[in-house]
Image (cartoon, rainbow, N blue to C red):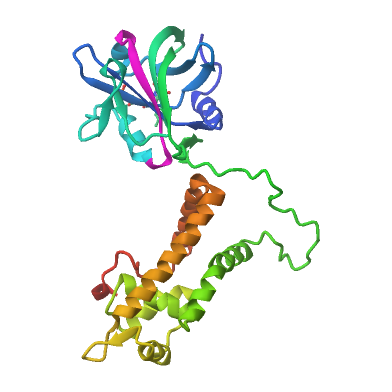
Amino acid sequence: MKTPFDTRTFRDALGTFTTGVTIITTLTEEGGQVGLTANSFNSVSLEPPLILWSLAKSSASVPFFTAAKHWNVHVLSAEQEALSTLFATKGEDKFAGLEYEAGLGDVPLLKGCAARFQCRTAFTHDGGDHIIFIGEVLGFDKSDRPPLVYQNGRYALTATKPREDVSLSSSSIAVESGYTEDLLGYLLGRAHYQMIHNMQSRFQQHGLNEQQFFILSVLCIQDGLTLEQLNRFIDYTGQRVTVEEMDSLVQKELIALDTKGLQYQLTGEGREVSVHNIAQAKAIEESLVDQLGDGDVMALKLLLKRLVVKTDPGLPDLWSDKKEEI
Ligand SMILES: Cc1cc2nc3c(=O)[nH]c(=O)nc-3n(C[C@H](O)[C@H](O)[C@H](O)COP(=O)(O)O)c2cc1C
């Protein structure tokens, strides 16, 4: 049988079918570890418990899997993209430095996965340029980690499609200005203010405004900044901190100027207030994780980070740039 159409286009069309990503491991007869990345995995039967995957006949792993009795399927978690890339690379010592356990027949069981299935070969079938392995599942385990996804030749993340009535362009009101409830700027702004709403009472308790909260948070990460350096870190807010604003924090004894009168540092109390503020921000995030789930929060964060990178005018990175370099 010859492919009656262009293989590349055929592959691209198949790539629209979104899958998870697995790593399948086994042992050679000499006890060497073998493994490869595969997204051809699928469920077959519940009773008896059967799964399948297919292996390219061109793969160096063919003799090992055809001889093996046992093999393990690892459904990768969203954090295991690097592992997927490693096991999709030919000629690497894929297991060097990896932590794994011994599964049935001593076959390597990798850690940190979304799910793992320990199998024995039930059948193999010829599948054109692939061999189809059907495995009987002898054991499995599952975690709550969100899965890694593969679509159109790229890694992806899942975000739950809400069952409740949340959808885009749901507004039936024709707004002539084009300012609809789905405008990205509106959504980002509203989400931000709704999220930090619960922080307001804390700010008030310490007589702080939102900007002063930012100042304390920045100094909590990079202590000992001049006003100019500090302003560069919060430039993205479009606001500038004034000497008067810093003076008010000095009067509250939350920050202090160094002996040269140039750099601002957190006082013991300032650090304590700041650490508590950040703890509350984290608690707000945790309650959001409870409501949205780990996977959606991870997807949301990654999309927001992409947006931050795309719209970044070249600001210093608070978490990595050293003060001297600003
Ligand atoms: C996301 C992804 C999915 C893959 N799925 C399969 C698959 O289902 N079957 C297969 O034989 N190769 C698949 N590959 C390619 C193999 O992982 C790759 O050829 C690997 O080098 C094979 O290892 P080996 O040469 O050491 O046997 C996939 C690669 C990636 C990145």
Provide residue 217's location: percent of width, then percent of height.
38, 73
Please, is residue 167 above or below residue 63 in the view? below
Q: Which residue lies furthest to the right in this view?
A: 173
Please, is residue 304 above or below residue 19 in the view? below
On whether residue 217 falls in the magenta region, the answer is no
| The quarter of the displayed image where residue 68 is located | top left
Seen at 38% across and 39% down, the residue is 81
Provide residue 11's location: percent of width, then percent of height.
50, 27
Please, is residue 189 above or below residue 245 in the view? above
How many circles with numbers are drawn on the protein?
0
The quadrant of the image that shows the C terminus is bottom left
Q: In this view, does 270 lie to the left or right of 212?
A: left
Q: Which residue lies furthest to the left in this view?
A: 30
Provide residue 162's location: percent of width, then percent of height.
64, 45
Seen at 63% across and 65% down, the residue is 186
Seen at 46% across and 56% down, the residue is 306
Front position in the image: 175 or 261: 261
Q: What stretch is highlighted in magenta?
A: 66-79
On whether residue 78 falls in the magenta region, the answer is yes
Can see residue 307?
Answer: no
